[in-house]
Structure formats: structure tokens, C-alpha cells
Image (tube, rainbow, N blue to C red):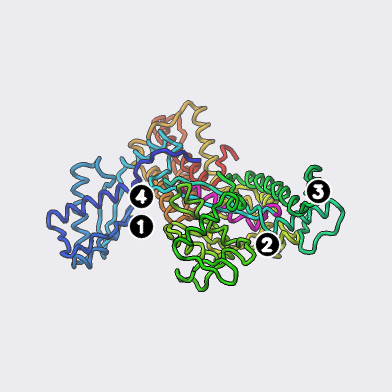
Amino acid sequence: MIPQAVPDPTLRSATIKAIERALAAATANGSLGAPADGSAAGITIEVSRPANADHGDLATNLAMKLARPLRRAPLEIAQSIAAELSREVAADPAATPIASVAVAPPGFINLHLADASLDGVIARILAEPASWGRVAAPKSRRINVEFVSANPTGPLTIGNARGAFVGDVLCRILEAGGHTVAREYYFNDSGAQIGKLGATVFALRTGAPVPEDGYHGEYTQALADELPEPVLASAQAPGADPAEVVGAWAAGAVRTGIEASLAHLGVHFDLWKSEGSLHTEGWVERAVERLRAGGYVFEQDGATWFRSTAFGDDKDRVILRSNGEPTYFASDIGYVTEKFSRGFEELIYIWGADHHGTVARVRNAAEAMGYDKEAVRMLLIAWVRFIVDGVEVSMSKRAGTFITLDQLLDEVGVDAARWFFASRGPTSGIDFDIELAKKQSSENPVYYVQYAHARIASILRRAAEAGLEPAASVGEAIGGSAEALLARQVARLPEVVEDAAALEESQGITAFATELATAFHAFYRDAKVVDPAEPERSRSRLALVSAAKITLANALALLGISAPESM
């Protein structure tokens, strides 16, 4: 993982600062003017990369945004701002990352980055490789991300896989984006399903028929065979509930297997939170009292209700049933209270699309308890259809028909599976053809990117054998077209991370890694890197490819994917 280092500004953010200075100067000297009503005050300066690289490295549409409040043509506004940018470049080139400015109709300001600024980026990458790619968040937050949270009634299936991939990569991206993140697994160790699992395992161990509503997978027989004698004795003691006693043990055993499967995937959690602890530690009771104090609890038909309709819900929600038993919703609101008590500023839940109906009531309860509703967010991930031999796999723990996550990883590989999920938006439904993925593994984009990293490692080894080491920076050699194209691609990583953290999506990372690999392969085709006859040029180019190698490795690390030294 990329460590918690203090990042330097990105070239994009430094460019935005330069535009801010130019705008202020143009306003102050009267060449631009200012709206009397201050309507331009809230306008955000946006900088993006032009679709056509010939137009520049970066561009802004600020002039079009200012046209209405300033009541001037966008082209005139762009020319005024561009003039101030050009003055700063001429007066103090070291103060700005910009080398030249051009205006294009209807009012775009196109900017070319200075070679010196790119060389500075390469030097920084080589000096501090571990922190390269980290950015400072506009407002750093303490975020709790809860994901996977599958019931411990059976092995982790590929049906749970997408939540694991999405949650893990999101946490990595948020951390690189400057936030403090805690990974959490909500462990449902109570309720009817645990009792049914316990009844199943007890029946198998004692030779009794498995209950009709029990679990029928092969794993239940394995649990029965592993059931410790002391636990069996406790389950058979007078007055004991066998389903409850064996269910508690079985849930723990299943959890151990789930942890092992997640470790296989490269996913770890900072906390495994037990649903039962929310009740025993009084968090559910505290949450109900907070709602009651706000006047949002009422009694009806012997049950205790939350007045969710006061917040736009279509109906009120039961917290405690008429028999006094808490609902799952009661646990949900207790969990919100417990999480905020730990000092988190934002809660992110990664749920399956089938949890859509739960979102509003939980957020409404959070607001009713006095928390910021916008700080409680649910990311609903779309379903994945897993295909084997052209047929969709129907998965059910109860029926025992499922493919485990471990089986998927053994078949496809951890890196290929991670790339597959990371390269797609989490809210888009996808089909995962397992057999096709296996057949096409050698052509999978992740291997293309990994090969670029391994190829650079090989180049650096050959250079060392020839007595050539990378320079501390690229220097004047960056002025060459081959070097400049690769350097510009390398320098993008912090901006890509910044965008990924803001959007809370990972597909921008995979796209960037692919583009960087392509840029490297093109560079290597056109430029001789290891050339003992030209040692200085070789050392400069070795510096550049070393920076590209670091950038590829750090981008892959954000996805939890390995960066091999050889392939």
C-alpha cells in the first residue's frame, strides 16, 4: 500500500492556481472587468485534458463560464486571462508549470506544460517512489467503509465477490486520495439463519434428518465432522438449545474460512463487527432512545415504530416487534450510532442492489438521531451473472449450489479477477464467463500492463550489467518527443487518483495503467534506452523508464494487483 506521506501539488492543481492568479490580475487591471452582482464568485475553475493532444496538455473552459456574469464574449475573456498567464511565464518561468498559452474558439484556453515542470515530477518520483500518486484531499475525512458482510452460514461465494473487490479497491483509492479509512465487516452472528445452520450441523453429526429449511451444501457435512466434542456435549446438555449452541460454533468456524478466502484475495479488515454486540453493548437501545427523544418513536399494535414518514418514506418502520424481538432495522440504527461514536465523519455501506429498499429508512433514522444524513451513504453494486459453459450459475447456500470465491481465484487468478472487476463501474451489471476468462487469460489487459512493468525491470537489470544507472532526473533530454510523451503520461497518476477518489470509482485507474503501458511500449519502440555509446542519454532515459515503472507499480497497487519483476 502507498504510505501516508504528505503529497506535493499535482501539475493540474498548480495550473489551476496559475489560472486563479491570472484571473485576479485581469480583474484588478481592468482588462476583464467584474460583475457588479458578484455572480462569478462561485464559479469553479476546471482543468481537463484536451481530446486532441496537439491542442495542449491541459485546457480550461473558464471563459465560457464567465461569459454570462461578465456579459462579454468568451473569446475576449479567454484572451485577457491568457495574456496574464503569458506575462507570468515570461516574468518568472519557475513560478508556473505552464510553458505556453493559446486561445481557441469559442473561448478555450489551451496550455502546454513546461519541460522543467515535467522533469521536476520525474525527479520527485525517483526521490520518493513510495508516496508517488498520493494526493491531498480538499477536506480529509475519517471514513468507515463496510463491505462484503456476508452471513456466516457458508463459504464466501462468487456471488459476494464483487462487494469484496469494490470495497477493497475503494478503500485503497480513498486512502491515496488523502482520507483516513477503516475497513469493516458486519458479522451477522445472531438470528434465525444461524439457528438453521446449527440445526443442520447438529442433525448431521447425530444422524438425524436435516431440517427441511436447513442447509444442504457439502460444507455442512465438513462442519459436522469438525464439531468439537465439548460443543456437542453442551448442545446435548439438559435445557440446551442444540441449534443455538452449534450455530454459534458453526458461525465462528465459517467466519474463519471467510477470513482465509479474503486473505487469498488480498483483502483485510480492520474490524469484524458482531451484530450481537450491538444488542449486548446497548447500541440498539441507545439508538431507540435517541429517536424517542426526538419524538420519532410511537407504539402501535404492541410494536415499537420509527416515524420514517416524517422524512419522506412511504411508510413507518417497525423497530421492535410485538413480542419484543428487535428487527434487522433496529440493528441497522444501532450500528449507525455505534459507528459515529467512534469518531467517523462519513459512513459508506457497500450493498447489493437488492438492498435498495433499506437505504432510505436507515438514512432517515440517521437524520432523526441528529446525524448528517449526507454522511451516511450506500453504494449499491449491480449483480454479476457468472457463466459456466454458457449457462448462468444459480447460487444458493441453502441448496448447496454455488461456486466459492476460492474456486474462482484458483481458476482465473487473483490479479485477473481484480482487474476484471476494477475496470467496470460498480453500478453496471456484468457477465463473468469463467471459462472464457481462463481461455483469454494470456490476452487479459492486466497481463499487458504487468508485462510493461516486467519489461522495464529487465531493461534496468541489463543497464546495471552494462554499468549504467538511472540519472536523478531526465534533464534536458525530456525535450525529445519520445521522452515528452511518456513523461506527460507518467505525470498524470496523481490527477487520476484525485478523480478516482472524488468519483469513488476504479475504472479510471485501469484505463490509466493501460494507457501508460501503451505509452511505454511506444517509447521503447522509438528510443534506445540502454546504449553504452551514449551513456548520458541512456542515464536520462533510464530515469524516465524508472519513473514509469514506479508509476505502473503504484497504479497496480491501488487495484491490489501485483507488479512482477519478470514474466
* Highlighted range, magenta: 153-175
| Residue 22 magenta-highlighted | no
Residue 387 has which mark? 2
Q: Is disc 4 surrounded by few (<14), some (14 to 19) or many (20+) residues within 10 Å?
A: few
Disc 4, SS: loop
Q: Which residue is mark 4?
A: 138
- Tell me the amino acid under the disc marked 4: Pro
Disc with the residue nearer the chain's start (4 vs 2): 4
Depth check, front residue: 363 or 66: 363
Residue 237 has which mark? 3
Q: Main secondary structure of the magenta part?
A: helix
Whole-Å distance between the Cαs marked 1 and 3?
74 Å
User: Cβ–Cβ below 8 Å for labels 4 and 1?
Assistant: no
- Tell me the amino acid under the disc marked 3: Ala
Disc with the residue nearer the chain's start (3 vs 2): 3
Q: Position of residue 127 (x, y in %)?
A: 40, 33
Disc with the residue nearer the chain's start (4 vs 1): 1
- Tell me the amino acid under the disc marked 2: Ile
Whole-Å distance between the Cαs marked 4 and 2?
42 Å
